[in-house]
Amino acid sequence: DLARAQIAAGDAVMTSLWSHVQDAGGRIDEQIDKHTGVQASAEGLTWSYANILHALHVRENAGPDPGTTAGPGTTDKPGTTSQPGTTAEPPKTCCNAVKFVSTGDIATEFPELLGKYAESSVDATGRKVFKKLDGDLYLHYSQDLPHKFEAWVFSDGQDTLGNVVNEKARQCADEPGQTWTWLNSDHWEDDISAKVVCDGSNVDCCSTISVSSSGGIGSQYPDVIGEYTKTLLYRAGQPVYQKGSQYLYYLDDVPHHFEGWTISTSLTELGPVAKTTETECADSDAGDWEFLNASNSWQVDATLAVDCV
């Protein structure tokens, strides 16, 4: 369990690092500003590359499930149970939030397409439909069987075909091997710099979760207790859950130096219940939930549980 936890912590660091440097064309500087998330200090530092290559090498040799050993109650056969105290990882799926980037012709001709998109629905083929966070543009899968056409496309409607497409269509919009082309008058041109990258989680989190507490949170903030349903909204690439006027979501509040899960009546401000541990889903057991007590200080409530329903 310790080995798994250490590897998971390392994976989280590498994922966070990637999110900050992915738009820099592979350049990795000496530092990342803790307030803005922008790379800083010496540009393209050799030592940074060496450390990352070393980390990737170690991670590859660690295997997919480091530290696993056979023992009582464990088996690889279907229908058996895992070791007591362990919880199965949530299933992997396509990313729930993506970002479209380009430094080529598409950026020049269609700058409005660049930016972040969040999952808004699922189409008849089981593929995610993404909507741009700051506009009415969609990234979706399109299929025209009579003309043997299928592609991921950007358009102003979920059922329309736009002028920017990737005909190497796979199940996920951000899968490797993308070739984005754009319609230039009467012919299509490639933009080799264009790509859709994951900007969220690829874990399929629960649709409904329950919040319970027999401690301070339950007594001081009874309104946060109960069942929450996943909405179509996303914050920091994570799903937003709602119960009446209460929201449970991942808040990345750079100006106030807070990053973590919170339960709040606002989608932009920290609520009186929070957890600073970074996890892929709200129902993860990692980290402690805290609440703002009567003395206006943060106190841990070890009894609070967020469970998948």
Image (spheres, rainbow, N blue to C red):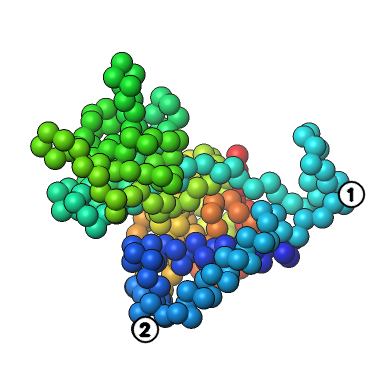
Tell which of 288 and 10 is nearer to you. 10
- Work out which residue is located at the far top of the displayed protein and give it: 146
With respect to residue 87, does 151 lie above or below? above
Q: Is residue 207 visible?
A: yes
Q: Determine the CA span between mark 2 and mark 1.
A: 52 Å
Residue at the image point whose x is 29% and y is 50% from the top: 192
Q: Position of residue 10 (x, y in %)?
A: 59, 66
Residue 267's x, y, as percent?
36, 55
Position of 262 with respect to 300 (left or right) is left
Look at 50% across and 47% down and name the residue there.
202
Residue 301 on image: x %, y %: 62, 64
Q: Residues within 10 Å of mark 1 (few under 14, many from 20)?
A: few
Q: Which residue is mark 2?
A: 42
Image quarter where the C terminus lies is top right
Q: Which mark is residue 72?
A: 1
Tell which residue pokes out farthest to the right in this image: 72
> Does 79 sit above or below residue 90?
above
Label 1: state its secondary structure.
loop
Amino acid type, mark 2: Ala
Type of the residue with mark 1: Pro
